[in-house]
Image: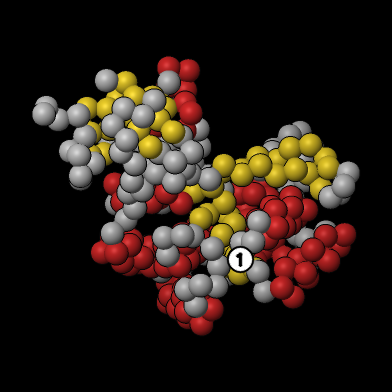
């Protein structure tokens, strides 16, 4: 039967079951880390140099430790968001990146910004924004990926390595061919639990910045699952309006509002 779901807690109104968060197993995480490392070190013009740069990054991350960060920001995605209008500057929006950093810091999060080093080159970085990047360096909230590298591998590896509580802030739908080289089932499951989408709102006179809206995943997985205690199955169905935008909402990395999902509760016969 169709079930009313408490979307804030994931509790089924039909059988009282709490939906689970279905994340990667430790073995799946380890395999993904190995695969990302392999992909990050191959395919470049100078693979030996790329391998050394990657080793320097993983060593840096290890020194910072597992609890160093709980929110990772995909700097390029945030910086170029809504920046494709006619006459838009070619550089990232440094202020916008900073607004997102400060938003998550204001919520008590430990933020890591991953940003390619080309965005800090003198010929790329306008002088009026230099104070912003200087502040990121002083606060040690930024890692700059080196020339010739793919910054996606860096934030993805960091997020998986740092643990289950870590979220990545990005609107990247991750359909590029290099993401397709990852094990699809594991990658989709990871995305569903760890990607926080965002939007940028109106100018706020009080904070002297634009309002930031974040859309984290719910506390439970929006996927078919069976309750181990009662044996009841719960099957999600996207609403028709949202379904028109996507054939398979589970495999999309875009935000799916829990209230747009209908649930079918199938209880075992007594």
Depicted 247 relative to depicted 22: above or below: above
Q: Would you say 154 lies left or right of 12 here?
A: right
Looking at the rendering, which quadrant does residue 248 occupy? Answer: top left
Horizontal and vertical percent for residue 222? 37, 37
Is residue 53 shown to the viewer in this render? no
- Kindly identify the residue that appears in the image at 65 percent across and 56 percent down: 107
Is residue 30 shown to the viewer in this render? yes
Horizontal and vertical percent for residue 122? 78, 66
- Kindly identify the residue that appears in the image at 27 percent across and 20 percent down: 1
Looking at the rendering, which quadrant does residue 236 occupy? Answer: top left
Q: Would you say 184 lies left or right of 231 here?
A: right
**Which of the colour schemes (rainbow, by chain, secondary structure, one colour) is used?**
secondary structure
- Counting other residues with Cα less than 10 Å from the Cα at mark 1, is it few (<14), some (14-19), or many (20 or more)? some
- Kindly identify the residue that appears in the image at 42 percent across and 27 percent down: 261
Closer to the camera in the image, 264 or 120: 264
Residue beneath disc 1: 110
Horizontal and vertical percent for residue 163? 42, 65
Horizontal and vertical percent for residue 192? 41, 45
Closer to the camera in the image, 116 or 137: 137
Depicted 119 relative to depicted 209: above or below: below
- Kindly identify the residue that appears in the image at 38 percent across and 67 percent down: 37
Q: Specify the quadrant that holds the C terminus.
A: top left
The residue furthest left is 270
Depicted 193 relative to depicted 10: above or below: below
Looking at the rendering, which quadrant does residue 223 occupy? Answer: top left
Depicted 183 relative to depicted 9: above or below: below
Give SS at disc 1: loop
């Amino acid at each position: 039967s169709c079930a009313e779901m408490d979307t804030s807690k994931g509790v089924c109104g039909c059988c009282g079951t709490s939906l689970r968060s279905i994340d990667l197993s430790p073995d799946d995480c380890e395999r993904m880390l190995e695969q990302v490392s392999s992909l990050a070190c191959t395919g470049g013009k100078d693979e030996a140099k790329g391998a050394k740069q990657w080793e320097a990054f993983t060593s840096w991350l290890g020194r910072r430790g597992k609890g160093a960060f709980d929110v990772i920001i995909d700097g390029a995605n945030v910086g170029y968001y809504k920046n494709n209008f006619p006459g838009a500057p070619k550089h990232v929006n440094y202020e916008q990146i900073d607004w997102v950093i400060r938003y998550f810091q204001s919520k008590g999060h430990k933020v890591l910004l991953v940003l390619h080093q080309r965005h800090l080159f003198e010929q790329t970085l306008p002088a009026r924004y230099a104070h912003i990047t200087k502040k990121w360096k002083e606060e040690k909230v930024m890692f700059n990926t080196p020339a010739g590298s793919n910054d996606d591998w860096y934030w993805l590896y960091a997020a998986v390595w740092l643990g289950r509580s870590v979220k990545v802030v990005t609107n990247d739908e991750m359909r590029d061919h290099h993401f397709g080289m990852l094990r699809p089932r594991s990658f989709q499951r990871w995305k569903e639990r760890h990607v926080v989408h965002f939007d940028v709102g109106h100018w706020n006179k009080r904070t002297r910045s634009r309002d930031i809206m974040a859309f984290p995943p719910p506390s439970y997985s929006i996927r078919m699952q069976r309750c181990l205690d009662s044996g009841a199955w719960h099957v999600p169905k996207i609403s028709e309006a949202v379904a028109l935008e996507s054939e398979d909402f589970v495999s999309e990395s875009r935000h799916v509002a829990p209230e747009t999902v209908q649930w079918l509760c199938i209880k075992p016969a007594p």
